[in-house]
Image (cartoon, helix red, strand yellow):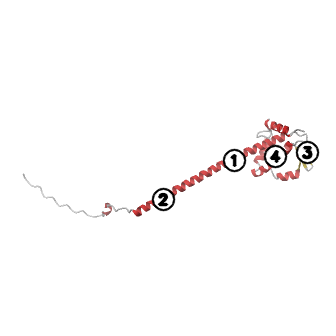
């Protein structure tokens, strides 16, 4: 029986040497279905369950109980998760009565690669969600800052208006001389100058 460390090393080698479940790989469509046909809320628990199943087998490859899954129970746990049946078959599980069994002679490379690919996909998905959340938070921050600036501007204008009204009340504007001129008023006629003296 291989030691867990040997299995882990073989698993890393299998994942690094051209993963069949990677995007564009011969079995990449299975992982595409899992990622794109299921919501994150369903993917998270399904990923953890698959990782647990694979982890137990890879840690103790000679332990028969980890290679046998009760079909009814495991499908109940996965529920209506799209693509999981295809994934389990692709890594080597076969139906045996009421169980799904991964034979003792079945290579574990496919199981390693499927786990690596799913881990990588979920890591990228988590990073994308984190970036989207960061952008959303920045946008909300900008919206709040713009709103605060507009409110401050309105408050300043309101204060200026109130100050202007107060200034008018305290210092009334003096009536100008022009305001006293009445339209239609007549001017006094100037006296006629005396005639110029004749001669000399």
How far is the residue under mark 4 from the one under mark 2? Answer: 64 Å
The residues bearing labels 3 and 4 have C-alpha atoms spaced at a distance of 17 Å
User: Which residue sits at x=66%, y=48%?
Assistant: 134
Per the rendering, the mark at residue 64 is: 3
Does the residue at mark 2 contact the one at mark 1 (Cβ under 8 Å)?
A: no
Q: Earlier in the sequence, mark 4 or mark 2?
A: 4
Q: Are marks 1 and 3 in contact (CB under 8 Å)?
A: no
Q: Residues within 10 Å of mark 3 (few under 14, many from 20)?
A: few
Q: Quadrant of the N terminus?
A: top right
Report the disc number at residue 159: 2
Mark 3 or mark 4, earlier in chain: 4
**Which residue is label 1 attached to?**
130
Left or right: 82 in relation to 130? right
Label 4: state its secondary structure: helix
Name the residue carrying label 4.
Answer: 51
Q: Secondary structure at mark 1?
A: helix
């Amino acid at each position: 029986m291989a030691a867990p460390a040997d299995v882990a090393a073989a698993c890393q080698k299998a994942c690094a040497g051209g993963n069949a479940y990677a995007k564009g790989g011969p079995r990449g469509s299975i992982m595409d279905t899992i990622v794109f046909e299921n919501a994150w809320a369903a993917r998270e628990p399904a990923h953890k369950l698959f990782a647990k199943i694979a982890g137990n087998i890879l840690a103790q490859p000679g332990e028969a109980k980890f290679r046998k899954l009760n079909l009814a129970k495991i499908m109940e746990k996965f529920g209506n998760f799209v693509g999981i049946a295809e994934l389990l078959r692709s890594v080597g599980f076969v139906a045996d009565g009421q169980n799904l069994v991964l034979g003792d002679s079945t290579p574990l490379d496919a199981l390693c690669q499927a786990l690596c690919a799913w881990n990588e996909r979920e890591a990228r998905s988590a990073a994308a969600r984190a970036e989207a959340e960061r952008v959303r938070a920045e946008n909300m921050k900008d919206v709040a800052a713009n709103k605060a600036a507009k409110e401050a501007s309105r408050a300043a204008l309101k204060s200026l208006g109130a100050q202007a009204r107060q200034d008018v009340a305290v210092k009334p504007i003096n009536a100008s001389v022009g305001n006293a001129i009445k339209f239609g008023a007549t001017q006094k006629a100037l006296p006629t100058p005396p005639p110029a003296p004749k001669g000399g």
